[in-house]
Amino acid sequence: MKYEVITIGSISTDIFMVSHSNKIELLRVHGHEDLAVPVGGKVLVEETHTAIGGGGANCAVSFSRLGFRTAYLGKAGADKRGDELLTELRNEKVTFLGPREGETGLSCILSGIKNRTIFSYRGTNNNLRASEVPWKKLDAQWFYLGSLLGESWKTSVKIAKYALREGIPLSWNPSIYLCEMGTRKLKPVLDACKILILNKEEAQALSGTNKQTSALLRELHKLVPLVVITDGPNGADSFDGKEQWHIMPKDVTVVEPTGAGDSFASAFVAAHLLGKDVPTCLRWGAAQANSVIQHFGSTHILLNRREIERAAKKSGKLTKNQ
């Protein structure tokens, strides 16, 4: 096969703005914390960082760093930001298979003391049409599907059906927006999915319940052979119909959590592709996420295979749940 992994998802420029200004406040007004800044005022920013972003691109870089022949399918803008992002993908040995049109996605991440708010412009990410997919080039051992909306969601469904028809295994990391659509509307992708990786909030939205992790794993396992649910600092759980494993990540200094989910999911799948058992897959996921959250940017500090094999040995505490 030409590629070992093809990732399908979004691509964007991520701009991080770090402010320690006391003008930024957290207020609890509607039952959750809201970020408050002065209307018409100016907030000083101490640092800025720019990085490649988007679930499809982030995971493509992760797979490539881990030694897999990787291609990325998505829609990049026909603009300067698109040029820069595709150059970065080439530098990471990732082949771009998608079209270019319109404006590239952009996210501005405002990071303060113990808080973060993301302003996300999807750009052309949601406009990938099935007619723009180079179907004959989708020659891969594995598909990794991220979260795409709009016309791109319709195309994602067709890609999932193609994977099922061609016998190409697929893993999926859906967003909360897709999960809120419910299992009936997502069935075409779930039917093709071999590994479902999502966070606890997404799992609850997908199941339409407020069940806790163990119950969620078992409910979603009825749809997908292997389910993994992440829960931030509380770790991650997996269930394959026989065993439930939990990993509690080691304590690290969190600088910026953006991209933690992508790094965990891609490393988990990478370990699976190498024939590792589920506990080792969890260790790889935790190791990659631990590395990413200690820095700004989702791809700058992604581990390679040698580094992750070493880091995985001490990435967290594993327990087997009954």
Image (cartoon, rainbow, N blue to C red):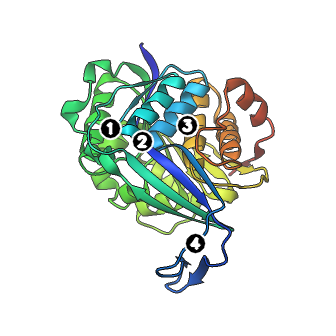
Q: How far apart are marks 4 and 1 (CA)?
A: 34 Å
Q: In which quarter of the image is the N terminus?
A: top left
Numbered marks: total: 4
N-term-proximal mark, 1 vs 2:
2
Cβ atoms under marks 3 and 1 closer than 8 Å: no
Identify residue for label 3.
266
User: Circle 4 — which element?
Assistant: loop
Q: Distance between the residues labelled 3 and 2?
A: 15 Å
Q: How far apart are marks 3 and 1 (CA)?
A: 20 Å
Identify residue for label 4.
43
Which-is-in-front pick, marks 3 and 4? 4
Identify residue for label 2.
11
User: Circle 3 — which element?
Assistant: helix
Q: The residue under label 3 is which amino acid type?
A: Ser
Q: The residue under label 2 is which amino acid type?
A: Ile
N-term-proximal mark, 4 vs 1:
4
Residue 147 lies, in percent from the top left, at: 39, 47
Cβ atoms under marks 2 and 4 closer than 8 Å: no
Q: Give the class, few, some or many, for how many residues have Cα within 10 Å of label 2's Cα (few <14, many ≥20).
A: many
Residue at left offset 52%, top offset 83%: 31
Which-is-in-front pick, marks 4 and 1? 4
The vertical placement of 25 against 173, above or below, is below
Q: Distance between the residues labelled 2 and 4?
A: 28 Å
Horizontal side, residue 261 vs residue 290: left or right: left
Identify residue for label 1.
75
